[in-house]
Image (spheres, coloured by chain):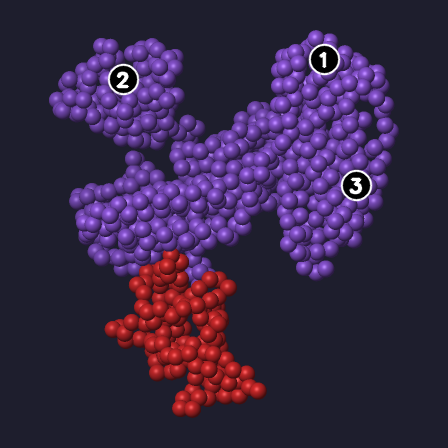
Chain colours: A purple, B red
């Protein structure tokens, strides 16, 4: 039998899925050995595999599965209790089965490996059998509230009744003991007779038991990914055809036709969304492997680690899920291996012996955030610096001047590995730099935060999907180019005098002064070697797209900025693979092809970021010059004649300019109608004293919309000045209500506004009243 | 019994070429193209083939023939490759011609340069020679 036939293939796919679940179930079960459901499901899985491979004639696989099944059946019947030794053996069995399946998948035949040792271990573990009595004695002496098993199905109903508060643990325990002593009746019957539960309560509990045992419903089918890709392409074509028809309808008057196109439009949009959704998978699909990974690793390192997950259901495109699988696994292993300390060390520091690894995922601003935190030792800055020095990645001088944050980021440098002793787990030189490169390859970013003794958090931001991304369309030299929005920071437009004078030259290299910082400029037409329609020198409008490449920023000068659009990303053929400045191509609404710029590629080609190491070094050197540990993005506001205020931009939801006539009163308070809500207004000038808003004679007012927990409030200010990134060093803290303190920003004394305090003062119930009325 | 093969034929600078019919996905008239800055001059641009983005290779440039006159629009012979379809830009399209293996002859030693790499040989037709193009090599720019 040389080719794997369809049936076997199906068996393999199904078995792999089952095995993955098995890993999870076993690890969970180790934590709560009383979970009969889990055991029963594990038993069923192995039983199915055993049965099916018997049918296909895979005898070796069958024999391994068989001993595993025997062991499991003893566990299920409560003759054995799951302990780490048993779990390890069972996991080894799962691995063996997986290995054999892999061999069958590749060759269609079983491998020749000898599994008799494993079989012997599994057989031996079935002995010695504790008797029913000993199990019981243990159970009673442990005084557990959860009843230990006599016979599994009955135990479950007892548990259910206790959980529902229908029966007392003691009563169930008594009934169980009666059963063990030879009472032939069902547990429920005994309980009803003892008047411990009402008959109808028992019926309810039994029904609940049935439904939960039914398991996952059969509402899913398997679909080949290539079929989905094809559907995706077809939908892309349909979208284009739709766009063309819509352009055509502009000149048509036939109402039936217009109606039909409108319908076509709606259906296409919905279809597109639907097909996109088929490619989405919850991140839980890859996370589910981690409890097993962590468990094995923790056992190997003699550590105790608990895995917690938040946002398992967060969905990502399948291709992205595939791409982040390995980097994430690496990070998780790193956290357990290097991050979390041994139980002794933890106890000595006053932490619980069991370390915690927290995986979080959530959507934010069209991107997916993934955070992996541990409560371990954190990154040892001195050790990192020392290692970087040894490896010649930094100079002693740089090490001296480096801030903590920069030092932590050293671990992303290629050729860096902190493991003092090389374990088989991690620390082979391929480290965090590989993680970083892989994440960046799919348009994501990585950041790490660490607190000595408290643990570290790795934050990953990745786009939702690679297939369709928001992009900014620009024109240069007659060609249209798409710039992925993830790299986009802001747009700057210089006109007239500014355009001619705004650009300074440093030895032939153009720079632009953006809020006090020098930003290197790259001319897209020069990089692409296309001739611009008008020469750069004599242009009176200069469009600069500020981009983020790696951790550097630069300005890309383009001829025209068109619009943002959702684009369908298509790869370039191999004839064009060698051009680093392009990431792919896309088809625009008019049916023509536009190229997608690879921002990192452009930056590299133009020298903004050079060789990986140089880049990191230059960056560190540049940053060390102005030490800042507390960079914040601030919104600068002007009050009265020359007073300056600042609010952290993170607290600002939107900036609005509203007509004064829109202000109404509600309960005596000024409000405006804003996005179908009533937005209470707070006049900052009134609260802070100083000049009043009426000093500004205009028909409109500037409103900063502040949102917290679904509630918004509008802060009326005199002027909105700028957005700056500044190192805030608060001096003269808190002299007056509403002001946190003062700092020097842009060489001007600026008051930091206490937004929380101001809102509290104006409407004390803002933070306390529930949103819904 | 002689082996027969069908070739899709086209003209390039007065020369008569053929590609195996099985390799040809379709033949389409001139399409608007998006030029690709920094790409090899052999690659003329990208075309939108019903939602698929296809790279167009100018076969004249590829074979180092002289440039097509600016007012003449090329035709697309879209061929299948492992890497997806690629379009070959040619001057004009000919018929599908059935050729016999006996009529084939390897190129003479005097054929040099790129052409030697890309032209497998010639089929001696009654009135002219039909050059057999190795389309895989033609679209692979490394050869």
Residue at 26%, 57% (x, y): give it. A478
Marks 3 and 1: which is nearer the front? 1
Q: Earlier in the sequence, mark 1 or mark 2?
A: 1
Identify the element where label 3 is drawn: helix
The lab-note entry on whether marks 3 and 1 share a chain reads yes
Distance from Cα at disc 1 to Cα at disc 2: 61 Å
Marks 3 and 2: which is nearer the front? 3
Q: Could you tell me if residue A413 is visible in this image?
A: no
Q: Earlier in the sequence, mark 3 or mark 2?
A: 3
Residue at 74%, 25% (x, y): give it. A152
Horizontal placement of B86 versus A432: left or right? Answer: left
The 10 Å Cα crowd at callout 3, few under 14, some 14 to 19, many 20 or more, is: some
Residue that protrudes farthest toward the bottom in the picture: B126
Distance from Cα at disc 3 to Cα at disc 1: 37 Å
Pointers 3 and 2 in contact (C-beta within 8 Å) = no
Residue at 50%, 52% (x, y): give it. A227
Q: Which residue is mark 3?
A: A66
Q: Position of residue A447 (x, y in %)?
A: 48, 36
Q: Which chain letter matches label 3?
A: A
Q: Earlier in the sequence, mark 3 or mark 1?
A: 3
Q: Position of residue A609 (x, y in %)?
A: 42, 47
Q: Which residue is mark 2?
A: A680
Distance from Cα at disc 3 to Cα at disc 2: 70 Å
Q: Quadrant of the C terminus of chain A?
A: top left
Q: Which chain letter matches label 1?
A: A
The lab-note entry on whether marks 1 and 2 share a chain reads yes
Q: Which residue is mark 1?
A: A191
Horizontal placement of A375 versus A345: left or right? Answer: left
């Amino acid at each position: 039998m040389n080719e794997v036939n369809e049936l076997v293939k199906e068996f393999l796919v199904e078995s792999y899925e089952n095995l993955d679940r098995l890993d999870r179930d076993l690890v969970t079960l180790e934590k709560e050995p009383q979970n009969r459901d889990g055991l029963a499901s594990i038993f069923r899985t192995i039983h199915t595999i055993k049965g099916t491979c018997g049918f296909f004639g895979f005898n070796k696989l069958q024999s391994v599965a068989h001993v595993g099944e025997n062991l499991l059946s003893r566990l299920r019947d409560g003759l054995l209790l799951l302990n780490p030794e048993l779990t390890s053996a069972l996991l080894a069995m799962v691995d063996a089965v997986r290995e054999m399946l892999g061999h069958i998948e590749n060759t269609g035949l079983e491998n020749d490996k000898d599994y008799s040792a494993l079989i012997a271990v599994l057989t031996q573990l079935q002995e010695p059998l504790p008797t029913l009595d000993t199990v019981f004695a243990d159970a009673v002496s442990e005084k557990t509230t959860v009843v230990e098993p006599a016979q599994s199905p009955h135990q479950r109903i007892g548990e259910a009744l206790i959980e529902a508060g229908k029966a007392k643990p003691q009563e169930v325990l008594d009934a169980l003991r009666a059963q063990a002593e030879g009472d032939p009746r069902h547990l429920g019957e005994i309980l009803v007779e003892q008047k411990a539960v009402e008959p109808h309560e028992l019926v309810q509990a039994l029904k609940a038991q049935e439904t939960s045992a039914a398991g996952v419903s059969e509402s899913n089918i398997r679909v080949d990914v290539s079929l989905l890709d094809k559907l995706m392409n077809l939908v892309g074509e349909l979208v284009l055809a739709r766009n063309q028809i819509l352009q055509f309808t502009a000149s048509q008057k036939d109402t039936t036709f217009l109606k039909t196109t409108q319908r076509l439009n709606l259906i296409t949009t919905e279809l597109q969304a639907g097909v996109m959704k088929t490619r989405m998978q919850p991140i839980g699909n890859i996370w589910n492997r981690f409890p097993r990974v962590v468990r094995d690793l923790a056992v190997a390192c003699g550590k105790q680690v608990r895995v917690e997950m938040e946002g398992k259901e967060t969905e990502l495109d399948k291709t992205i899920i595939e791409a982040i699988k390995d980097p994430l696994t690496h990070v998780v292993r790193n956290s357990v291996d290097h991050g979390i300390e041994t139980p002794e060390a933890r106890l000595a520091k006053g932490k619980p012996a069991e370390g915690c690894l927290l995986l979080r995922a959530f959507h934010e601003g069209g991107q997916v955030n993934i955070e992996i935190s541990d409560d371990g030792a954190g990154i040892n800055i001195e050790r990192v610096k020392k290692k970087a020095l040894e490896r010649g990645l930094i100079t002693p001088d740089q090490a001296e001047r480096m801030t903590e944050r920069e030092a932590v980021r050293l671990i992303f440098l290629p050729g860096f590995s902190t493991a003092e002793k090389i374990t088989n787990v991690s620390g082979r030189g391929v480290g965090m730099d590989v993680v970083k490169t892989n994440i960046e390859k799919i348009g994501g970013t990585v950041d790490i935060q660490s607190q000595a003794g408290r643990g570290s958090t790795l934050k990953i931001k990745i786009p939702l999907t690679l297939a369709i991304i928001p992009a900014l369309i620009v024109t240069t030299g007659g060609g249209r180019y798409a710039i992925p929005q993830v790299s986009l920071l802001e747009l700057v437009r210089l006109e007239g005098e500014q355009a001619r004078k705004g650009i300074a030259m440093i030895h032939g290299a153009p720079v632009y002064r953006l809020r006090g910082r020098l930003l290197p400029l790259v001319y897209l037409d020069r990089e692409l070697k296309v001739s611009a329609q008008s020469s750069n020198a004599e242009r009176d409008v200069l469009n600069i797209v500020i981009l983020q490449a790696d951790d550097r920023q630069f300005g890309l000068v383009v001829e025209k900025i068109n619009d943002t659009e959702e684009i369908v990303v298509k790869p370039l053929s191999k004839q064009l693979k060698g051009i680093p400045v392009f990431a792919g191509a896309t088809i625009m609404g008019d049916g023509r092809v536009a190229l997608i710029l690879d921002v990192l590629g452009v930056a590299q080609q133009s020298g903004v970021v050079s060789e990986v190491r140089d880049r990191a070094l230059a960056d560190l050197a540049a940053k060390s010059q102005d030490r800042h540990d507390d960079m914040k993005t601030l919104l600068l506001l002007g009050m009265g004649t020359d007073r300056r205020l600042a609010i952290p931009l993170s607290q600002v939801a939107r900036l609005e300019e509203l007509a004064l006539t829109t202000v109404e009163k509600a309960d005596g308070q000024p409000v405006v109608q804003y996005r179908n809500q009533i937005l209470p207004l707070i006049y900052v000038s009134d609260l802070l004293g100083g000049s009043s808003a009426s000093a500004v004679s205009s028909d409109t007012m500037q409103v900063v919309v502040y949102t917290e927990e679904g509630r918004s409030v509008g802060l009326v200010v005199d002027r909105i000045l700028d957005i700056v990134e500044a190192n805030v060093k608060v001096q003269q803290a808190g002299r007056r209500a509403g002001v946190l303190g003062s700092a020097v920003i842009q060489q001007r004394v600026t008051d930091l506004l206490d937004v929380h305090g101001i809102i509290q003062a104006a409407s004390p119930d803002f933070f306390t009243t529930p949103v819904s009325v | 019994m002689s082996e027969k093969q069908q070739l899709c034929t086209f003209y390039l600078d007065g020369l008569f070429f053929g590609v195996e019919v099985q390799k040809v996905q379709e033949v389409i008239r001139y399409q608007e193209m998006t030029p690709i800055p920094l790409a090899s001059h052999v690659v003329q641009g990208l075309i939108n083939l019903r939602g698929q983005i296809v790279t167009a290779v100018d076969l004249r440039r590829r074979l180092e023939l002289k440039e097509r006159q600016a007012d003449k629009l090329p035709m697309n012979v879209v061929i299948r490759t492992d890497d997806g379809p690629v379009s070959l830009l040619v001057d004009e399209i000919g018929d599908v011609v059935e050729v016999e293996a006996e009529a084939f002859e390897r190129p003479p030693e005097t054929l040099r340069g790129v052409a030697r790499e890309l032209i497998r040989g010639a089929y001696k037709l009654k009135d002219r020679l039909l050059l057999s193009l190795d389309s895989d090599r033609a679209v692979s720019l490394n050869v």
